[in-house]
Image: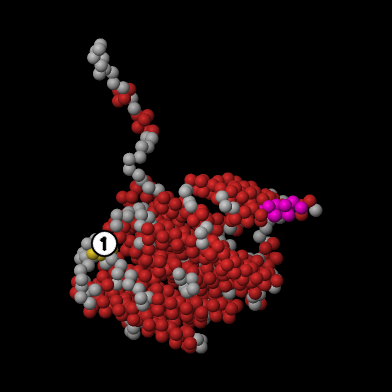
Amino acid sequence: MELPNFSLALPEIFIALSGMALLILGVFRKQEATQGIAILAVITMVLAALLVPAASGNRAETFGGMFVVDGFAVFSKLLVLVASSLCLVMSVNWLVKEKLERFEYPVLVLFATLGMLLMISANNLIALYLGLELQSLSLYVLAAYQRDSGRATEAGLKYFVLGSLASGMLLYGSSLIYGFAGTTGFDALAKALEHGAPVGVIVGLVFVLAGLAFKISAVPFHMWTPDVYEGAPTPVTAFFAVAPKIAAFSLLVRVMVGPFGAVTAQWQQVVVFVSVASMLVGSFGAIAQSNIKRLMAYSSIGHVGYGLIGLAVGDQVGIRGLLIYLAIYLFMNVGTFAIILAMRQKGRLLEGIDDLAGLSKTHPMMAVAMAIFMFSMAGVPPMAGFWGKFYVFMAAVDKGFITLAILGVLTSVVSAYYYLRIIKVMYFDEPKEALDRGVSGSLTFIMGVNALLIVVFTFIPSPLVSSAGAAAASLFGG
Amino acid sequence: MIQALVFYVFAAITVASGVMVISARNPVHAVLFLILAFFNSAGLFLLAGAEFLAMVLVVVYVGAVAVLFLFVVMMLDINFVKLREGFLQYLPIGALIGLILLVELALVYGSWSFAPEAPLSVATRVPDLAVVTNTDALGRLLFTDYFYLFQVAGLVLLVAMIGTILLTLRSRPGVKKQNIARQNARTKETSVELRKVPTRGGI
């Protein structure tokens, strides 16, 4: 019996061990150590991000083919680690100000991130499920972290119940697929499905698709999103909106393109439907919202719809578009949530869109950053968000999905209404009561860096485009 | 013949007690039926030759999970009548969805087929059961082929534990707790005071 190649999973092993070490540290040092542990957790993620490319190179498998590393995995893992560490940096300030310092918070974020990395590298249905559960369980607890708040508890419970249902569907689908092929490994599944799939496998595939669609909150499995985003503590919402989505998207891509690549025609129609429905709900649902966290929930549903166009196309260009979209989405969203976290009045956190009124006069720099994010999210050329949509739509038009691309353009025009309304409120409405001055350094830093990255990408898109292209190519064995 | 008979007895009791779990009016009875269902499924496992799974089912599910349920049901004051209120109202639509799903699954079952590679890939995993015992065979698979999954499952349990503590543990001020170190450190000097009591004086 030879040992598996552990070096491929080095970032994951490092995060798992550090998470346990930080847990022990927290137990002994009690709640005063929360800030220190959060900083150590951020350092852990940065170090893990440095370890990720070291394990790359060509496609390689370990642990009996259950764990795979390729260019696609490296790209997605880097995105997830960046998203998680930025969100954790944002949370530290919130934990201190709300007097909710508990050392479990950074530890849970670390384990959730670990679950996401395992999802991205999953090459087996069981590995997929366990990674997903590790991530989801940590997220359920984080949603209910503010346990004295009724809304947060409700959010956590709602997320847990619906999430368990989705996991159940995923497992049921997997059992049907296993029943057909007699194996759970993706490579063996791909081989078994080469001669086409019988009805039983198609039903299983649809169940798996439904379970994963829940995790990226695609319509019609989106009902939990607005409630959970609104109820959960804001830094947790920021985390929910980026990191798990990127991980679940990569997982969805790997499952659909890998084992089910031979039956593309079967899942393509489902993905097209889900994509169109998500774009419609995301753009029309957000119009009537007055709470900015709810608005961001609908906005994220819409963005999932655009990303799914890339998957629906199903070829290398489409996946490249999806990866570019996810990367830009990450920075836009983290930046916006940093601003939402800075919306305080007399120390109290605000969530209304109207509370931004007159921001251009009281906090001009913050208003500029918010304007950049909103223009980018609306997809106004030449902002980064426009390029994200451009690459996805281009892939769709190339493959003949013209209706899908036209629907995407139309819904993004509709969604521009509510993004631009925020800019209008900031620049043209009279301030009622100014927001607190003295925004904390970490939030300012995140706003600045993300706004800068969006601007940089607007003018120099080639590094991201070429690395996303390489990542997508590695998935198709190119 | 005997084996088939035993199988049908176990299976029938399992299904019947499963129905009773969701239809029993008294929640304590429901949990007791659940325990019955677990015992009978353990019997089914024994018939299938999986003695380790049978024992684990009894030890873990009956010994821990079901007893925990019983505690929760008895200790929490849940108004079950109120919980059941919407039951009849949602029954028609629930039954309809269940029926549709049943028909679909029947169709799937009717047209079921296996991949040509399926029997082969299942067979390669299992060690020769004539040589090793059931538990041994499970252990060999779990700690070699499925080592990775075993570790990740452990992490999932760790997160569940952290979550439970985070969401339920509260430090209440003013609760009297036993401090053994302080009790042991008590000496005669710190706890006993000798006073001279004058006659008819009192203290």
The secondary structure that dominates the magenta segment is helix
Which of A105/B27 is in front? Answer: B27
Q: In this picture, is A329 found above or below A380? A: above
Instruction: Locate residue A141: give its quadrant.
Output: bottom left
Q: In this picture, is B168 found above or below B174? A: below
The percent position of residue A251, horizontal first and vertical second, equals: 50, 70
**Coloring scheme of the render?**
secondary structure
Q: Say which residue appears at 57% left-offset and 67% top-offset.
A: B92
The number of numbered badges drawn on the structure is: 1
Q: Say which residue appears at 39% left-offset and 33% top-offset.
A: B180
Q: Identify residue type, mark 1.
A: Arg
Q: Secondary structure at mark 1?
A: strand
Q: Is residue A22 magenta?
A: no
Is residue A203 at least partly visible in the picture?
Answer: yes
Q: Say which residue appears at 35% left-offset and 40% top-offset.
A: B175
Tag 1: Cα neighbours inside 10 Å, few (<14), some, or many (≥20)? few
Instruction: Locate residue A352: give its quadrant.
Output: bottom left
Viewport quadrant of the N terminus of chain A: bottom right
- The stretch of residues the image draws in magenta is B5-14
The percent position of residue A120, horizontal first and vertical second, equals: 49, 67
Q: Residue furthest left?
A: A361
The percent position of residue B99, horizontal first and vertical second, equals: 62, 68
Which of A311/A154 is in front? Answer: A154
Q: Is residue B9 magenta?
A: yes
Q: In this picture, is A410 found above or below A64? A: below
Query: In screen coordinates, is B69 left or right of B53?
Result: left
Q: Say which residue appears at 51% left-offset and 79% top-offset.
A: A273
Q: Tag 1, which chain?
A: A
Q: Which residue is mark 1?
A: A348
The percent position of residue A17, horizontal first and vertical second, equals: 44, 54
Q: Residue furthest right?
A: B1
